[in-house]
């Protein structure tokens, strides 16, 4: 399968609602590597790498997020997978 990368910025009510933890769990379940973190401006940023289908599922998941989140917008930048990640983590 082809490997893919997506760098996303998610805006809305996405901090303090378990968005990062749920993103990590969803990514690990799909075998996607990368990271997720809160930004000072209230958005959440994430990088996903893995099989193209799994990365697309994560991008789609970001549009809804955790059950307490309210997602207003998801900006996605696609790229080639670098293979630099061993797993999926929350960054601080």
Image (cartoon, helix red, strand yellow):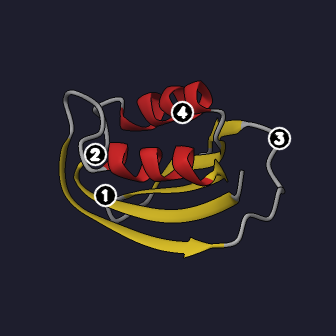
Q: Is residue 29 left or right of residue 58?
A: right
Q: Is residue 15 left or right of residue 35?
A: left
- Residue bearing the label numbered 4: 24
Tell which circle, 3 or 4, labels the residue nearer the N-terminal end: 4
**Badge 3: how crowded within 10 Å, few (<14), some, or many (20+)?**
few
Is disc 2 placed on a helix, strand or loop? loop
User: What is the C-alpha distance between the residues marked 4 and 2?
Assistant: 14 Å
- Residue bearing the label numbered 3: 86
Q: Is residue 9 left or right of residue 63?
A: right
Tell which circle, 2 or 3, labels the residue nearer the N-terminal end: 2
**Badge 2: how crowded within 10 Å, few (<14), some, or many (20+)?**
many
User: What is the C-alpha distance between the residues marked 3 and 4?
Assistant: 13 Å
Q: Position of residue 38 (x, y in %)?
A: 45, 51
- Residue bearing the label numbered 2: 14
User: What is the C-alpha distance between the residues marked 1 and 4?
Assistant: 18 Å
Depicted 9 relative to depicted 20: above or below: below
Depicted 56 relative to depicted 23: above or below: below
User: What is the C-alpha distance between the residues marked 2 and 1?
Assistant: 7 Å
Nearer to the camera, 64 or 17: 64
- Residue bearing the label numbered 1: 42
Callout in the foreground (3, 1): 3
Task: Determine whether label 1 and label 4 are within 8 Å by CB.
Answer: no
User: What is the C-alpha distance between the residues marked 2 and 3?
Assistant: 25 Å
Callout in the foreground (2, 1): 2
**Badge 1: how crowded within 10 Å, few (<14), some, or many (20+)?**
some
Quarter of the image for residue 2 reads bottom right
Is disc 1 placed on a helix, strand or loop? loop
Tell which circle, 4 or 2, labels the residue nearer the N-terminal end: 2
Is disc 4 placed on a helix, strand or loop? helix
Q: Position of residue 61 (x, y in %)?
A: 35, 42
């Amino acid at each position: 399968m082809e490997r893919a990368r997506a760098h996303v910025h998610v805006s809305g009510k996405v901090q303090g609602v378990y968005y990062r933890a749920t993103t990590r769990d969803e990514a690990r379940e799909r075998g996607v590597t990368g990271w997720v973190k809160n930004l000072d401006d209230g958005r959440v940023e994430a990088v996903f790498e893995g099989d193209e289908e799994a990365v697309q599922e994560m991008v789609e998941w970001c549009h809804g997020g955790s059950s307490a989140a309210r997602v207003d917008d998801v900006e996605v930048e696609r790229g080639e997978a670098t293979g630099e990640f061993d797993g999926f983590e929350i960054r601080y």
